[in-house]
């Protein structure tokens, strides 16, 4: 089946992450279902631009937000590029299809003052030690929660004080670590190894010595931020935004932040520049006599 071949292609050659592959599969299944229902069409190579446009209209009518629709458009665009590559079609039905406009929203981040209020308790047990390292790794490296969960002991280079992060599409990047972070990791590893004789092959483990789930990491971060910030969103990704915003506020270049975050396109990193501009406006309004 064509979709199965396409999924195999983005897994093997494009090296998309498992979550991305799952989303692409879901998007294609939904598109196929729409074509069968509205056009009684099963051959994806016979799809026209008009059909794609009608699909977009239907998604709008069903209340999908533009960001979700754009992701599905991106899926279809990638699929039909694959069809062109395999000479299955002469022209892509995605020609002329543009992404929908997105509202400009400022990235949410935790202020430096609030970050310094985060506490982990006075305990010296394994969960407390692990939670402290979990938080500091997210905030001090800007890694994604999936990247955090995938870390192994071998990714920590204590000699050169750096961490290898396995990012999206299996692309690795190196992020520097402070001397304090190296010490924190060493202390955690000693406690972890003393606590669990049979454990998962990961750097960070859950309370039973197994691999952490996305919800486990989310709940930990949400609990840590709950008492220090009024932000509605208290997720691991907020710490990624906070990492980038604080770097930019302290003078780091967008190119440097792009490399640290593992962004493929600098345009993705530029969303953090808007935060700084808004902050400057706020400072100007408060400090200038005629602000």
Image: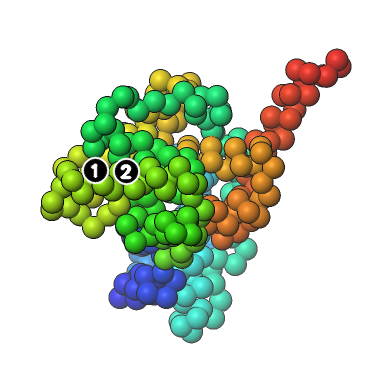
Residue at 45 percent of width and 42 percent of height: 180
Distance, label 1 to label 2, CA atoms, is 6 Å
Which residue in the protein does label 2 denote? 187
Quadrant for residue 13, please give it: bottom left
Q: Residue furthest top?
A: 289
Location of the C terminus (image quadrant): top right
Quadrant for residue 11, please give it: bottom left
Q: Which mark is residue 265?
A: none
Labels 1 and 2 touching (C-beta < 8 A): yes
Location of the N terminus (image quadrant): bottom left
Residue 131, horizontal then vertical, whole percent: 32, 36
Q: Secondary structure at mark 2?
A: helix
Left or right? Give the position of 56 relative to 154: right
Q: Residues within 10 Å of mark 1 (few under 14, many from 20)?
A: some
Whether residue 47 is visible to the viewer of this picture, yes or no, is: no
Residue at 43 percent of width and 26 percent of height: 118
Left or right? Give the position of 237 relative to 148: right
Residue 113, horizontal then vertical, whole percent: 55, 24
Residue 205, horizontal then vertical, whole percent: 25, 46
Whether residue 117 is visible to the viewer of this picture, yes or no, is: yes
Task: Please state which of residues 224 and 159 is positioned toward the viewer in this rendering.
Answer: 159
Left or right? Give the position of 199 relative to 39: left
Residue at 23 percent of width and 58 percent of height: 201
Residue at 32 percent of width and 24 percent of height: 121
Count of numbered circles in the view = 2
Which residue in the protein does label 1 denote? 191
The chosen color scheme is rainbow
């Amino acid at each position: 089946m064509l979709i199965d071949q396409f999924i195999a292609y983005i897994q093997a050659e494009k090296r998309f992450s498992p979550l991305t592959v799952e989303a692409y599969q879901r998007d294609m299944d939904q598109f196929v279902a729409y074509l069968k229902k509205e056009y009684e069409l099963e051959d994806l190579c016979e799809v026209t631009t008009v059909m794609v446009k009608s699909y977009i209209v239907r998604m709008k009518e069903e209340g999908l937000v533009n960001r979700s629709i754009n992701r599905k458009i991106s899926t279809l665009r990638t699929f039909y590029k694959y069809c062109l590559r395999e000479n299955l079609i002469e022209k892509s039905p995605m020609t002329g299809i543009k992404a929908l406009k997105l509202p400009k929203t400022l990235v949410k981040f935790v202020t430096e003052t609030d970050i310094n209020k985060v506490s982990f308790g006075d305990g010296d047990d394994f969960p407390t030690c692990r939670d402290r390292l979990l938080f500091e790794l997210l905030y001090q490296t800007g890694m994604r929660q999936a990247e955090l969960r995938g870390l192994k002991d071998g990714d920590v280079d204590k000699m050169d004080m750096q961490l290898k992060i396995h990012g999206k599409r299996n692309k690795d990047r190196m992020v520097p670590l402070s001397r304090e972070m190296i010490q924190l990791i060493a202390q955690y590893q000693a406690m972890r190894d003393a606590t669990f004789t049979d454990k998962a092959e990961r750097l960070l483990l859950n309370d039973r010595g197994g691999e952490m789930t996305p919800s486990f990491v989310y709940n930990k971060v949400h609990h840590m931020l709950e008492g220090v910030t009024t932000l509605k969103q208290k997720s691991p990704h907020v710490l990624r935004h906070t990492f980038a915003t604080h770097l930019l506020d302290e003078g780091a270049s967008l190119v440097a932040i792009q490399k640290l975050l593992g962004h493929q396109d600098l345009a993705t990193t530029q969303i953090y520049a808007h935060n700084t501009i808004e902050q400057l406006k706020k400072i100007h309004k408060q400090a200038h006599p005629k602000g």
